[in-house]
Amino acid sequence: MVTIVGARPQFIKAAPVHRLLRRRAEEILVHTGQHYDQRLSDVFFDELHLPHPDYHLGVGSKNHGAQTGEMLMKVEEVLEKVRPDVVLVYGDTNSTLAGALAAAKMHIPVAHVEAGLRSFNRRMPEEINRILTDHLSRWLFCPTQTAVQNLHREGIAKNVHLTGDVMLDAVLYNRKLAEERSRILEQLQLDPRSYLLVTLHRAENTDDPRRLKSIVAALNELSVSAVFPMHPRTRDRLRKVGLSIQNPLVKVIEPVGYLDMLQLEANAMKILTDSGGVQKEAFFLQVPVITLRDETEWIETVEQGANRLTGANKEAILEAVERFEVDYTRVSSVFGDGRAAERIVDHLMRDIEL
């Protein structure tokens, strides 16, 4: 079996599955290099106890077409050499689509973890990646009932499995570890519930100067402390359009590892993000999340009242920071029981001979 990853969220999702899969099958790990920065890649492998990749394709940052095309070519070369029984892909990145396309063209069955998500915004590259990958896959492992229903509406019903969310598995497994090992709060001199946590990286925000300017304006008007681990892509876009964080209350830091990020999330008063994974981690950790997007594929978090969508609107962001609160006694679990990886591996082992 070949597992293809390339970005931070995929490392997190792959770790719980890998722990169980390696006991029952031979797994070859392919890293496309989509997240090429050591701070966004190597540290996650180490902290999540993932083995170093058998193949590192070193594709790096490029425009979507060039990046996906180079990944497709290099993944195909690996699959030609390895000839696996299954290709396992995660989420909605260009690495996901390239892996699924390469496998499908070589008639190798594809298994998609986190299938069925839809934001219904096809201007998002991730939405295109999700849809195409789902329609190429033989096994579709869905984190929620909503995801199952989305696939059914598109005529996909065979081998659709409601497993729960592997990111919940990861949070439950690593939460205590983060408390024991992370020193990020002490390093940044932060008290629990005394700060906001900010993440920003999606193309819909960073590549649109109008949206980026509005979000930065909101951050510059915050009246409470905030920590902003800044993605290299975001740093580059800010520099190119001449924007900067001027607010002394906003502490911009380098990207952090998984355990440090969990610790920052768990102890924040609120989280502002455009990341799908961070939205869920906030939900699992019972921290109110303000999503800097106009829609979300994790609609359940909004329906449960734990996620406020503000888009890039400055006034809406500041109002949510000031007023948005969550009554977690009214929030129910919709992402499973923390045993998604077990179900995924069981389904695969029952259906294939390895």
Image (cartoon, rainbow, N blue to C red):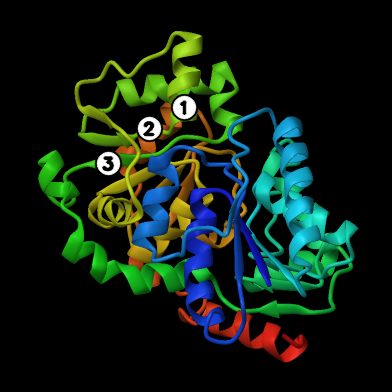
- 226 and 201: which one is in front? 201
Q: Which amino acid is tagged 1? A: Thr
Residue behind mark 3: 196
Q: Which mark is residue 329?
A: none
The residue lying furthest to the front in this view is: 81
> Would residue 302 be visible to someone looking at this image?
no
Q: Residue at x 31, y 20 (%)?
A: 220
Q: Which mark is residue 230?
A: 2
244 to the left or right of 309: left
Q: Residue at x 59, y 49 (%)?
A: 296
Q: CA distance from mark 1 to mark 3?
A: 18 Å
Label 3: element kind: strand
Q: How many marks?
A: 3
- 300 and 113: which one is in front? 113
Q: Pick whichever of labels 2 and 3 is earlier in the sequence.
A: 3
Q: Nearer the viewer, mark 2 or mark 3?
A: 2
Cβ–Cβ below 8 Å for labels 1 and 2? yes
Q: CA distance from mark 2 to mark 3?
A: 14 Å
Residue 265 placed where, x, y %?
A: 31, 53
Quarter-of-image position of residue 286: bottom left
59 to the left or right of 102: left
